Amino acid sequence: MTATPQLDTAPLVSPPESAVSRPRTRLLALDGLRLVAALMVCLYHYTGRGGTISESWHQSPSEVFPRLSQVAPYGCLGVQFFFVISGFVICMSGWGRSLGDFFRSRVARLYPAYWVALVLITAAAFVLPVVVKPVRADEFLVNLTMLQQPMGATRILGVCWTLWAEVRFYVLFALFVVVRGATYRRVVLFACVWTLAAAISTTSGNALTDAVVMPEYAPFFIGGLALYLIHRFGSSPLPWGIVVMSWLLGQSAAVRDLWHPGAHGDFTRHPVVIVLVVTLAFASVAVVALGWTRWASWPWLVTAGALTYPFYLVHEHLGWFAVRILHRGLGLAPWPTLGLTVAAMLALAWLLHRFVEKPFGPRLRRALKG
């Protein structure tokens, strides 16, 4: 069925007349990109930073992995990569859904594995408190809500700050797009207004505005939204303009947050490399949006996508436990320790997907509908 995007009564800029509204289908290449982004963050947490992981290695990762630690600090940009992918995926999954369906799908997707990850990491902290300190009962309970960060409570999962950013994106997209039904025009207006608000709030100094608008992360979500419009309706100047604007603002935000002039401990980042990694993130999703990855139809990519979220949840703290046990406890060499730790976290992620997400996600979705 051929159609032009629904622009209500006043089109902004129409895409090509031949644009085809593609149905929502699973894009396996995106599954692979999601796992790549998760592995980038994992590499950063194990070999590209100091802190707790230095205690697990018994020295700075820059000394354990002299060459790898020059690359690993850029792995933290896997988060921005995730956000571009998330903008694409959430626009795709929210298209044609009611607000209730969208809410139920997000809750059922996020919470089951998250709750189990909280239990596992809390239990590990009691078993080996020299790695991560156990939290109080009240702190554990508030972490169940996924709202611990705005509440000012101790975070059990170090990576949960990114989930808080995702939740805010979901709420904004639901309130301004999904609630009235996703259309080309509504997504474009949402993207443009959010871009302007994010740019203005960068210098506002208002904590509430920053928390809502997320100026440091908004360009990545917005770029993903526009790339989905390109995927669904075809190329046209307007969505590509949004993508370029998002890239320009996103690379600036990333350099501002992640680059520090002069010496900065054992780990350094170069601003040019940060820009290149951000560019690669946008370009990778753009390649998928343009349909250039349809040949990537390997079944294992489905598994890669399924493992990404649970792996992301457990890899940081439980990985630190594994490194300490394997390297300092059992005397295993650094590279085998690193490989076994990543493999163990992937195996645990598969277990969480198979025995938690698959059975309990649909049940939770049905319960919320009841």
Image (cartoon, rainbow, N blue to C red):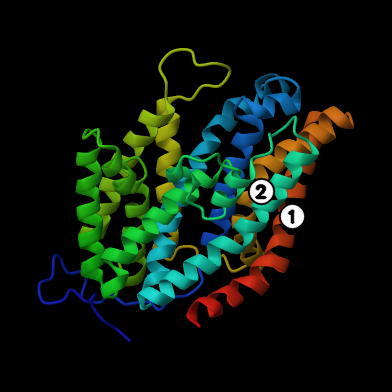
Judge from the rendering whether residue 309 lies leftward or rightward of residue 318; answer left or right. left
In the rendered image, residue 107, in percent from the top left (x then y), is placed at 50, 66
* Real-space Cα separation, disc 1 to disc 2, in angstroms: 8 Å
In the rendered image, residue 21, in percent from the top left (x then y), is placed at 32, 77
Residue drawn 78% across the image and 36% down it: 128
Contact check, label 1 and label 2, Cβ < 8 Å: yes
Residue assigned mark 2:
314
Answer whether residue 101 is visible to the viewer in this image: yes
Point out the tag, 1 or 2, that comes first from the N-terminus.
2
Please identify the residue farthest to the top as the structure is shown.
263
Q: As rendered, which of 286 and 126 lies closer to the eye?
A: 126
Judge from the rendering whether residue 206 lies leftward or rightward of residue 144; answer left or right. left
Q: Is 94 rendered above or below residue 349?
A: below
In the rendered image, residue 240, in percent from the top left (x then y), is placed at 27, 56
Residue 348 got which mark? 1
Q: As rendered, which of 271 and 135 lies closer to the eye?
A: 135
